Image (tube, rainbow, N blue to C red):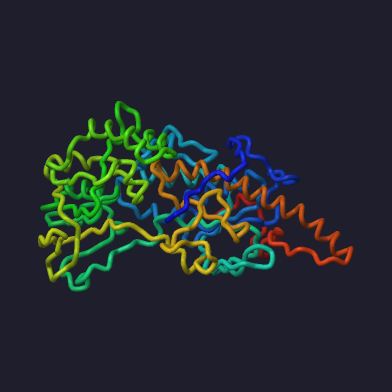
């Protein structure tokens, strides 16, 4: 189970506009600073971390294997919008503009990220694939397609949804219809007139089912394994995610008592439309199983109109048939699997002892990893109130933690030199700032 980032005991994190610089390291002429931190991944989490590290005076570079910022976002389906409003979803140090709209679209988010890089002078090195991170004598060794980088600090931010996951259903290889993961879905046009089964009732599955049901398909069914809670996107103009944001630190039962009645009153009983009632309360379901509620962006209307037909979970495939958990059989022509993603971190850092049994980071955000000083993850939680909101809170905290760590390493070096002069054996340093490789010199606001 993922251990979520929390504020380390005894530390006070200042507001964003008072995040301090490192001692003796003003944020001027950044190109003349030694490289101290490598951030892996140029998505919202990685860019937020890099911006706040630079603001703290930490020389930082972002390594990105593709030629685009936030590459997975480019491949999301047409019409995608953030489920939280712009004032809850912006990254630290730069709000969305009024032109971005209240519910930011995929394309406006990508444009915003480009502006964010320019605004903060973030150095992004595109086309550099990180293959492995190892411990080194003075910090960390980062093996890449562009050579080896030696740095005291590494931040891994490759994304929560990195590797599409398709269950190993029995008989899948022999299915005569078409099967695609939700990551390959763009719009309903290729499925006009066809019988479509969407598998998965997370936000992606519900929204894709809503899109295809109105896109000229012959029939749309939705396979339900864990019945979800469905909540309105806003009530009287107030985003419903404000509720989850306020109860995130409460016990599950108390969260259910505060959120449940309002949701039942505004959404009602969906069992009469074929969607089974959830087995636990709205907040309890998230805390126990990590299942977040479905934010309604058209799903409720399609369900009530009979455009979406809920069916039981998928058990196996047989020829042109899909076998369901209630022993029913259906013959869809297309199966869209909205079955989630995996982090895909094992080859990169699995040998470092920083992942749990499911391959997820054991700590995220500003929380230091035991036995791995100077190593951090960013953006691997799936909070109730939205990932981008959590990133905005965690990035300044991470930057402060890194700055403190580097300051401690800097303070330890004079003691080591005095110990050498006195003939004592100096302690082994694990965080001395390393110089950039010869071909990486330059201003830190240069990016491709």
Indicate the position of residue 121 as horizontal and vertical percent values: 59, 46
> Total of numbered circles in the picture?
0
Q: Residue at x 72, y 55 (%)?
A: 409
Indicate the position of residue 393 as horizontal and vertical percent values: 51, 41
Query: Looking at the rendering, which quadrant does residue 303 occupy?
Result: top left
* Apparent side of residue 421 relative to residue 429 in the rendered image (left or right): right
Indicate the position of residue 87 as horizontal and vertical percent values: 44, 34
Is 34 rendered above or below residue 253?
Answer: below
Of all residues, the one furthest to the top in this rendering is 236
* Apparent side of residue 18 relative to residue 390 in the rendered image (left or right): right
Query: Looking at the rendering, which quadrant does residue 336 occupy?
Result: bottom left
Relative to the observer, which residue lies in front, 6 or 171? 6
* Apparent side of residue 442 relative to residue 420 in the rendered image (left or right): left
Look at the image and tell me in which quarter the N terminus lies.
Answer: bottom left
Q: Residue at x 30, y 26 (%)?
A: 236
Is 427 rendered above or below residue 410?
Answer: below
Is 119 rendered above or below residue 424?
Answer: above
Q: Residue at x 52, y 45 (%)?
A: 6
Indicate the position of residue 445 as horizontal and vertical percent values: 61, 49
Relative to the observer, which residue lies in front, 332 or 261? 261
Query: Looking at the rendering, which quadrant does residue 284 occupy?
Result: top left
* Apparent side of residue 45 relative to residue 139 in the rendered image (left or right): left
Is 435 rendered above or below residue 56?
Answer: below
Relative to the observer, which residue lies in front, 50 or 366? 366
Of all residues, the one furthest to the bottom in this rendering is 174
Look at the image and tell me in which quarter the C terminus lies.
Answer: bottom right
């Amino acid at each position: 189970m993922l251990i979520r980032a929390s504020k380390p005991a005894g530390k006070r994190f200042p507001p964003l506009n008072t995040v301090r610089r490192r001692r003796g390291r003003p944020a001027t002429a950044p190109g003349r600073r030694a490289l101290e931190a490598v951030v892996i991944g140029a998505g919202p989490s990685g860019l937020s971390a890099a911006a706040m590290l630079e603001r703290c005076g930490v020389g930082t570079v972002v390594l990105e294997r593709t030629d685009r910022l936030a590459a997975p976002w480019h491949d999301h389906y047409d019409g995608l919008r953030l489920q939280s409003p712009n004032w809850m979803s912006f990254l630290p140090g730069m709000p969305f503009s009024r032109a971005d709209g209240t519910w930011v679209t995929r394309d406006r988010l990508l444009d915003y990220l480009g502006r964010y890089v320019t605004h903060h002078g973030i150095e992004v090195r595109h086309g550099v694939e990180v293959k492995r991170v190892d411990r080194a004598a003075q910090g960390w060794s980062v093996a890449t397609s562009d050579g080896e980088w030696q740095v005291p600090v590494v931040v891994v931010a490759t994304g929560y949804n990195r590797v599409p996951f398709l269950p190993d259903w029995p008989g899948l290889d022999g299915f005569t219809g078409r099967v695609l993961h939700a990551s390959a879905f763009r719009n309903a046009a290729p499925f006009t007139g066809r019988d479509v089964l969407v598998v998965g009732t997370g936000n992606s599955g519900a929204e894709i089912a809503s899109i295809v049901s109105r896109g000229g398909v012959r029939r749309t069914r939705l396979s339900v394994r864990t019945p979800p809670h469905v909540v309105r996107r806003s009530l009287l103009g107030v985003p419903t995610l404000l509720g989850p944001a306020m109860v995130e630190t409460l016990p599950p039962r108390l969260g259910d008592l505060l959120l449940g009645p309002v949701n039942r009153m505004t959404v009602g009983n969906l069992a009469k439309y074929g969607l089974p009632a959830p087995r636990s309360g709205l907040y309890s379901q998230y805390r126990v199983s990590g299942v977040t509620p479905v934010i309604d962006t058209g799903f409720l209307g399609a369900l009530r109109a009979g455009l979406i037909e809920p069916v039981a979970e998928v058990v196996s495939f047989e020829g042109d048939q899909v076998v369901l958990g209630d022993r029913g059989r259906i013959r869809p022509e297309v199966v869209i699997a909205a079955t989630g993603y995996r982090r895909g971190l094992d080859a990169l850092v699995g040998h470092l002892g920083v992942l749990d049994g499911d391959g997820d980071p054991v700590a995220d955000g500003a929380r230091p990893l035991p036995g791995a000083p100077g190593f951090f993850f960013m953006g691997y939680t799936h909070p109730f109130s939205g990932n981008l909101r959590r990133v905005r809170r965690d990035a300044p905290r991470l930057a402060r933690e890194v700055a403190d760590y580097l300051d401690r390493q800097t303070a330890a070096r004079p003691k080591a030199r005095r110990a050498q002069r006195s003939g004592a054996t100096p302690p082994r340093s694990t965080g001395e700032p390393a110089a950039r490789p010869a071909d990486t010199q330059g201003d830190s606001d240069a990016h491709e």
